[in-house]
Every structure is written in structure tokens, then in C-alpha cells.
Image: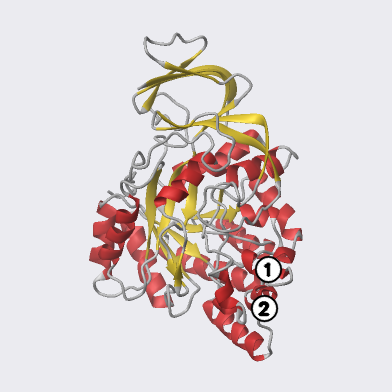
Amino acid sequence: MTILIQGGEVVTDSERYHADILCEGETIARIGQHLTAPAGAEIIDARGCHVFPGFIDPHVHIHLPFMGTHAKDTYESASRAAVLGGTTTLIEMCCPARDDDPVEAFEVWMSKAVGHSICDFSFHMGVTRFDETTPAALTSIVRRGISSFKVFLAYKGAFGVDDAELYRTLQLAKSLGVIVTAHCENETLVSERSRELLAAGKCDPAHHHESRPPQVEAEGVNHLMTFAELTGCATYIVHLSCAEALERALAARKRGVRVTIETLIQYLVLDKQDAERGGFEGAKFVMSPPLRDVRNQEVLWRALAAGDIDTVATDHAPFDFATQKSMGASDFTKIPNGIPSLQERVSLLYTHGVLPGRITLHDLVRIASTTVAQTFGLYPRKGAIAVGSDADLVIFDPAARSTISAATHAMNVDYSAFEGWERCGCARDVLVRGTRVVRDGTCTDRVGLVGHVGHGQFIARTPSHF
């Protein structure tokens, strides 16, 4: 298939210029002025639009058995939501239970994705225990094309690893050239504070925050940084939410610790008061780490603009409000954690970041595409607009306006955390490896969706030592 994108403004992490882009097969073949379309080529008129490299979400949950239930999305629904929102590649957290065989778990996660996705995908391999069989198992998974692990310093007795397991995981990762992504909260403090709150009758969603306040996250970050410093392993802090945790991470970076920092779109636009809504409405906003005091939003935005925070993800974790969040109606510790946000990340970054001047268009590309690709071994195949790169492209209409609603989103979940919010801009046309998967889209449920399930491919990534 040959596609010529004409007249758009190309925007990368460092450049901004008007040019035509010729896509042949799965890659970008030419970039230049006034290119001539070959015979039979499809032409996309991008005048008045930005042309971005496809956006990459580095932190999603699709197949997720968790807290006695299961996340609602499949790859069919999640990849629809992704491409409608301009995301062309997902990196999912593969999260086996502590007793699961890692290789078998990896095969399960792969089976849920291969042949079922519209967009491309990869995985972070969760390490939920470390014993004598673990090094061989993880090495075999790395050889399959995985260059990142995931550890939890939370969820004691479930996904969480102890300190010996953490140390050995980082040592192995260092030897393999693998980056370790980490959920940073002190699990003992979370457990003890939760017990105290429940004993005092403080059981509603509003008290979830007090079970894991900023100091608990900051201590988790500091803990990881100590282990990273001693092992020399490259680390990636997922879903950093507050100033206290950021301070610890930047202090470690200043002394030479190899750390990349991610925040989430919801921390930038929602706050602690959302989780304190009455009538159990706050349960819609329960996640870990929790939404923070509103003062943290500007801290995070400034850190993004300065390059101190490197990426913005979603930690997409869709659980129905009516039938799943309600499991914690009398005990906040039983509310399945997570917010559905996969479809809205790019438009919310544009609406609440670019338009008010908090970040630039270059920042948008950097934090939601290019740095992700560079960090996780996808660049320059992904995250770039360059000859030879995959033709993952988003024609973004900055003049479009729409309203976010669960009634029109493509995610398989019964509520939106951003219900009724006005959205500026949309991914009008989206290409994944040279195939148009969205045509004249409006960022809403299936409108403009032309991509077929099964087009998306597993993207193998090679760590630095292989």
C-alpha cells in the first residue's frame, strides 16, 4: 500500500515544518516538499493539521486478573480505543501471580494480544518472585524480544517482591541490559495504615489516599533508588504522582543513578477531591498511588516541561463501576485499583498542556512518543518521522472539538473518569505501519475506525547486551 500525506505540519520532538510524507508498504519512504503521488497511491489531505509520529503508551493493563476480578478490556476493545486516541503502540504490563510460571504467563499474555489487536504492542515482563528457576526463565523471555521487567514494591502477598528478590532482579537485569520498571510504594506502610484506618471505621474511598500518602510513595522511590545505585541497573519509575516522590527521584538522578520517570495523565488533570466524591462516586477514581492534592499538578507539569519527568502514560486499568468497583463498598482496600484512560491521553495532554502553554507541541511528542521509544528499545523504528521508520503517523486536527463520555468511548468499561469534559483536537487520521486504521475520526467510539483486528503486531525489542 502506498499513501501520500500532503500539506501537513510535521511535528517531532525537535522539529516543526511543512512537508509531504510518502509511505510505501510499512515504512516512510520520502519526506519533502511537493511530492508526486505514484500511480494508485492513496492521498491524505493534511492541510491545517499537525502530523505527529504515532504515540506510544508505555504502561497499560489489558489482560489483568486483579483483586478477585478481571479488567474489562480485551485487545479488540483496547486497541480500538488506542488508535482512536492517536496511540499506535502499547506496552502492556504482563503481571503473573506469584505462584505462576513466568514463561507460561508470558505465553498467556501473548495469546491475548496476537491476532487480536489493531495497533502494535509489546510487554514489560512482571517479576513477582525470584528463585533458582527465575534467571533462566527470564533470560528466555528476554530472548523472545522483551527488554524490560516490572517489579512491585507494593501489593504485599500478591505481586510484591521482597528486598532479596528486588536485589536479585536488578542484578539479573543489569547483566542482561534490561531496564526495570517499578511501582514504588512501601508495602509495609500501606498494609499497616490500611489496617489502622479500617479498624477505626474509615472504610470509604476517600480514605484510600490516607493509606498511602505522599511519604509512602517517596519512601518507595528512595528504596528503589538505593537498590539501583548499588546494582547499577537502569530503572524506570512508573506512575509518579507527587512532589515528594519526584524530589527523591531527582536527587538520585543527580548522584548518577540511572532512572527514567513516568507520570500519568490523570495526575495532571484530576486530584484528591475526585476520590472524595460522595455516594461512593469516589471509587471511580481509586488507583495506586492515589490522586494527590491539586498543588501537585503544577509541579508535575513544570517537571515535564523541564525534562525532569520523561514520559506520560495512562496505567489504563478498566474496571466497571457498577459491578467491580462496588466490591469495595464497605472496604476501600477491596476496590479494584485503576482508571480507564487509554483513549484520552493525547487529547487531554493537548487540551490541558499544550493549549494553556504548560508544554509545547515538541514536549507532547517527546513525552508521549519519542522518549518512550528511546527508553524501551523501539527508536527509531517508532517515535520518529524519518525515512525508514515505521509509518506510524497521526494526522491531528487542532480545530476539532468534542465531549468525552462513556456513552461514546471505545473502552469496554461503564464510566469515564472525564465524563462531560470538553476536548480540543483529535486524531483525525491514524496510520499503523502504513495502514490507515482511522479515517476522518472524531476520537469517539468507532467513528472513523477502519483498521482491522489482527493488523497489530508484537514488536520485539533487543536489550543492550543481546
User: Could you tell me which residue is drawn at 69 percent across and 84 percent down?
Assistant: 202
Q: Tell me: 34 left or right of 432.
A: right
Can residue 13 be seen by looking at this rendering?
A: no
Upstream in the sequence, badge 2 or badge 1? 2
- Nearest the eye: 120 or 326: 326
- Nearest the eye: 237 or 345: 345
| Rendering quarter of residue 400 | top right
Counting from the top left corner in percent of width and height, residue 316 is at 52, 56
| Rendering quarter of residue 15 | top right
User: Quick one: quadrant of the N terminus?
Assistant: top left
User: Could you tell me which residue is drawn at 64 percent across and 64 percent down?
Assistant: 285
Counting from the top left corner in percent of width and height, residue 235 is at 46, 58
Counting from the top left corner in percent of width and height, residue 12 is at 55, 31
Can residue 36 be seen by looking at this rendering?
A: yes
Q: Tell me: 76 left or right of 334.
A: left
Identify the amino acid type marked 1. Answer: Gly
- Estimate the spatial distance between the alpha carbons at disc 2 and disc 1, rounded to whole Å: 9 Å
Identify the amino acid type marked 2. Answer: Asp
Local SS, label 1: helix
- Nearest the eye: 225 or 10: 10
- Numbered label attached to residue 86: none
- Nearest the eye: 250 or 366: 366
Which residue is the site of mark 1?
A: 282
Which residue is the site of mark 2?
A: 204
Is the residue under label 1 in contact with that under label 2 (CB below 8 Å)?
Answer: yes
User: Could you tell me which residue is drawn at 34 percent across and 55 percent down?
Assistant: 112
Counting from the top left corner in percent of width and height, residue 344 is at 59, 47
Residue ranking furthest to the bottom: 199
Q: How is the image coloured?
A: secondary structure
Q: Is residue 404 above or below residue 60?
A: above
Local SS, label 2: loop
